[in-house]
Amino acid sequence: MVLARWTLRLRVRYGETDRMGRAYYARYFDWFTDGRTELIRRLGLSYRRLEDEGVFLPVLEATCRYLRPVDYDDELELDVELVRLTPTRMDFAYRLRAAGSAQVVAEGETRHAFIDTRGRPINLRKARPKIWAQLEGLQLEVPVEAGRPGGGDGGR
């Protein structure tokens, strides 16, 4: 079940490519991070706020399936979905498409745990009930937005 969804529009920058002009494989995980961070922000939270309150979200598992190569200056849309939320975990799914198209170029997932400042797993419902209440019962669809997170234009 999709609890929240957001689409990030981006363009492959020169520094994100390899010698062949293709997007370097590890950049996909950077894009996933950008999309996830912005989705959390759209939900009224932020990584900064979570961390200021002693809650961290390390990646437990990350996967990416590369379906088609993307090149320098290609425009892409990254669909990010919050697909699982429990008091101890958040899971996200990603679908990277050619902009304005249904053509999927990559798919991935990340799984995250809620931990405290000492790296111990926590139950968010018990440890930070206000944050948990803010996340509980989400059904949010956030519109496509141009540009990169933080107000930058991604070199466009």
Image (cartoon, helix red, strand yellow):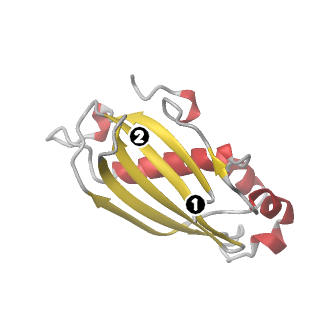
Residue found 43% across the figure and 49% down from its top: 30
Amino acid type, callout 1: Val
Q: CA distance from mark 1 to mark 2?
A: 18 Å
Per the rendering, the mark at residue 53 is: none
Question: Image check: 109 left or right of 46?
Answer: left
Residue furthest to the top: 156
Amino acid type, callout 2: Glu
User: Percent position (x, y) of residue 39?
Assistant: 60, 48
Q: Looking at the picture, tell me which residue is in the foreground, 106 or 111.
A: 106
Question: Image check: 81 left or right of 77?
Answer: right
Task: Tell me: residue 22, above or below residue 134.
Answer: above
Mark 1 lies on residue: 2
The secondary structure type at the circle numbered 2 is strand
Residue found 78% across the figure and 64% down from its top: 132
Task: Tell me: residue 101, above or below residue 155.
Answer: below
Residue 89, quarter of the rendered image: bottom right
| Labels 1 and 2 touching (C-beta < 8 A) | no
Mark closer to the observer (1, 2): 1
User: Percent position (x, y) of residue 110?
Assistant: 48, 64
Mark 2 lies on residue: 77
Residue found 57% across the figure and 37% down from its top: 143
User: Percent position (x, y) of residue 99?
Assistant: 36, 35
Q: Looking at the picture, tell me which residue is in the foreground, 119 or 144.
A: 144
The secondary structure type at the circle numbered 1 is loop
Residue furthest to the left: 20
